[in-house]
């Protein structure tokens, strides 16, 4: 396993891999790896000749400077984990390798970025779309792996991949959960033990709505109400939003038909904001 810091070195390796007709899978991360990331790595490993993981805490996707500074960084620990998963290359550039002096080109995906997470984190998806574009252009992967937990991020990345003509297949991996059902996230570390236990109410609420859907409920407002009522039973939980949307366009749905839909949720426990979702009418 080689750790690459320079963009030029990553370019020349990806050029060489293309010449050798190797299949390249890519898992972009911001480090602080947990079981959710490792699941992406595990899935990716099975689908390629060469596996590349990036570790880059992307400054442009943080709308709060304090969050950027506080973001956990431990390349040595992350690299040790990735070595166990037979990763070929870690791409871990410094910020000025990705954003050189005078950097002034950003990728703005319209539509899918304006609501939900985009509403409460202005500029966040512009930063994600910009860095993913730069990373795709540098690594040139055949496949790139993302977690279903960040469903809106997935919709943004699928949109930009299609619109900008990247020849990269986006593979979405189901959410990995703690034993309680809480979706794995680096933010879980910031919960108190009690909050962490109580945060399982998020998936309980989503599952309750999904069960109602399976029993025939098609009215989105009624399904959303089931979620709200369940969240309201937990005093530590503050609901930010629950939305029922089309899986790709993220447009709000009133009555659920045959298309894939998502119930998306954001809930705050103290200052920590957690997101999760379930898929309705899953096709694959
Ligand atoms: O999901 C993440 O960890 C980040 O948003 C990503 C995709 C690595 C871009 O910085």
Image (spheres, rainbow, N blue to C red):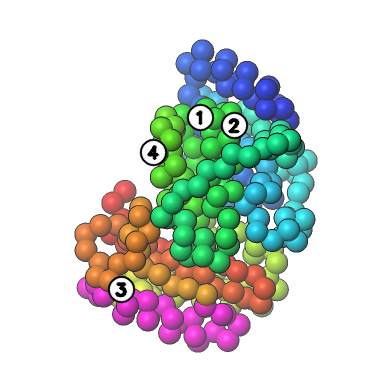
Can residue 182 be seen by looking at this rendering? Answer: no
Q: Which numbered disc, 1 or 2, marks the residue closer to the eye?
A: 1
Secondary structure found at label 3: helix
Looking at marks 1 and 4 on the same chain, the residue that comes earlier in the sequence is marked by 1
Magenta residue check for 35 = no
Secondary structure found at label 2: strand
Looking at marks 2 and 3 on the same chain, the residue that comes earlier in the sequence is marked by 2
Give the crowd class for mark 3: few <14, some 14-19, many >=20 residues within 10 Å. Answer: many
User: Label 2 belongs to which residue?
Assistant: 52
Q: Which mark is residue 220?
A: 3
User: Label 1 belongs to which residue?
Assistant: 141
Q: CA distance from mark 1 to mark 2?
A: 9 Å
Highlighted magenta segment, given as a residue range: 216-239
Whether residues under marks 1 and 3 lie with C-beta atoms below 8 angstroms apart, the answer is no
Residue 78 in the image: state x and y as whole percent.
71, 43
Residue 280 in the image: state x and y as whole percent.
32, 62
Query: What residue is at 70 percent from the left and 67 percent from the top?
Result: 190
Q: Which numbered disc, 2 or 4, marks the residue closer to the eye?
A: 4
């Amino acid at each position: 396993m080689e750790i690459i810091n320079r963009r030029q070195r990553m370019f020349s390796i990806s050029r060489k891999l293309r010449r050798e007709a190797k299949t390249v899978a890519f898992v972009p991360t911001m480090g602080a790896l947990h079981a959710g990331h490792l699941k992406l790595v595990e899935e990716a490993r099975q689908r390629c000749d060469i596996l590349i993981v990036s570790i880059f805490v992307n400054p442009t996707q943080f709308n709060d400077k304090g969050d950027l500074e506080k973001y956990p960084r431990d390349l040595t620990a992350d690299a040790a984990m990735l070595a166990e998963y037979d990763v070929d290359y870690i791409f871990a550039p410094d910020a000025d390798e990705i954003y050189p002096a005078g950097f002034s080109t950003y990728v703005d995906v319209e539509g899918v970025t304006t609501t939900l997470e985009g509403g409460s984190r202005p500029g966040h998806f512009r930063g994600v779309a910009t860095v993913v574009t730069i990373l795709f252009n540098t690594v040139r992967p055949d496949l790139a792996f993302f977690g279903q937990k960040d469903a809106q991020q997935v919709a943004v990345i699928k949109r930009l991949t299609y619109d900008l003509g990247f020849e990269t297949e986006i593979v979405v991996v189901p959410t990995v959960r703690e034993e309680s059902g809480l979706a794995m996230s680096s933010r879980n570390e910031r919960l108190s033990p009690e909050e962490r236990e109580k945060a399982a109410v998020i998936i309980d609420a989503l599952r309750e709505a999904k069960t109602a859907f399976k029993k025939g409920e098609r009215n989105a407002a009624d399904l959303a109400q089931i979620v709200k009522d369940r969240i309201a039973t937990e005093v530590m939980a503050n609901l930010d939003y629950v939305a029922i949307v089309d899986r790709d366009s993220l447009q709000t749905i009133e009555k659920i038909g045959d298309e894939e839909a998502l119930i998306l949720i954001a809930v705050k426990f103290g200052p920590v904001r957690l997101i999760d979702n379930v898929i309705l009418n899953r096709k694959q």
